[in-house]
Image (cartoon, rainbow, N blue to C red):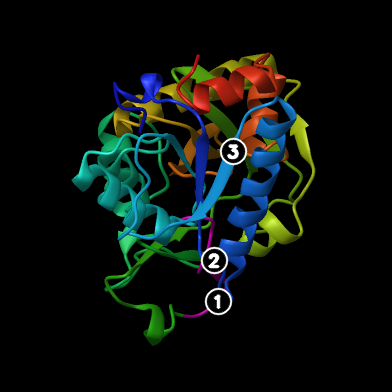
Amino acid sequence: MRTRSAAYLPSPLIVLVDRWRFDPLAWLHRAEARAIVAEQRAAGRAVEVRSFDPDRLPRDARILLRLSDPVMRDAVRALEASGTAYCGPGGAALERCYDKWRAYETVCRAGIDCPETRSATGEPGFAPPIIVKPRRGSDSIGLRVVRRGPVPARLRNEAMLVQPQVLGAELTVGVIDGHAGEPLRLGLAEGVPYTFLRKYLLPPKRMLLTDRTLAARAQHTALAVARALGVDWAVRVDFILERARNRLLFLECDAAPLVGPASAFAASLAAGGMARAEQLARLLGEA
């Protein structure tokens, strides 16, 4: 969240990261933080990297949050409670996006098309294949496909959501400060889920859309999603284009995406004409 005072905070830049622990998500965010730190130091900026400690919050510095989602939520709560300005997602927006059920309800009320989504506590009401995903979270952690038979009993609880599997092309769009990047199509075969493994460890090729009408439609819808969810920093908005009915369906708004130089967020904005220097300036509240 770029608070009103963030634009006037002095250097150096402090990048808050996860403490080292045996967790792939923490490793990914620490690696991304190193890339951003390298960019800033190459530009001649003094940068300090610190592990997040709720009892030792930075003061009198520009703070950039590069944390895994669970730690990001803790850090945002602590910083907001202390009145400390930082560069990262605001708490309210982060929670709206983190809770997929709430996000779907909000986006649907705004007139944006979404897959049919239900709690996993009862019968799904649609035939397999069925997508089962955690209600809270991001990065496709815990996502699975039930291709036949009922949803397993261990997954039928309030913490999980179910959706019919939609076949089509998956798209992602980076958004910041009311600017939408070029939609990128992910090189996945139809029916192959975009799991955590495929998102970060075996990432598919990203391709620009040749259909300019569809590209403009995805950009417009991504901005509409961002407005509906009240996002206040960088987000990545994911869709699936159901080709059979030409429906562009909202899948997720990641309010704490990877924003490093190799990220889909950065690639989308760069393809849309926003140079990396401007991206960094906007991420740091300096544009």
User: In the displayed structure, does residue 92 sit left or right of residue 35?
Assistant: left
182 vs 27: above or below? above
Q: Residue 258 placed where, x, y %?
A: 58, 44
Residue at left offset 34%, top offset 65%: 125
- Pick the front one: 48 or 97: 48
Give yes or no for residue 106 being in the magenta stretch: no
- Pick the front one: 25 or 53: 53
Q: Please state the extent of the stretch shown in magenta in the rendering.
A: 137-149
**Residue reaching furthest bottom?**
153
User: In the displayed structure, does residue 167 sit left or right of residue 233?
Assistant: right
Question: Quick one: label 3 or label 1, which is nearer the N terminus?
Answer: 3
Residue at left offset 43%, top offset 83%: 152
Q: Residue 283 placed where, x, y %?
A: 51, 28
Whether residues under marks 1 and 2 lie with C-beta atoms below 8 angstroms apart, the answer is yes
Which numbered marker is on residue 129? 2
**Quadrant assignment for the N terminus:** top left
Q: Give the alpha-carbon distance from disc 3 to disc 2, as whole Å.
A: 48 Å
Query: How many marks are shown on the rendered structure?
Result: 3
Residue to which mark 3 is pinned: 47
Q: Give the alpha-carbon distance from disc 3 to disc 1, as whole Å.
A: 52 Å
Q: Give the alpha-carbon distance from disc 1 to disc 2, as whole Å.
A: 6 Å
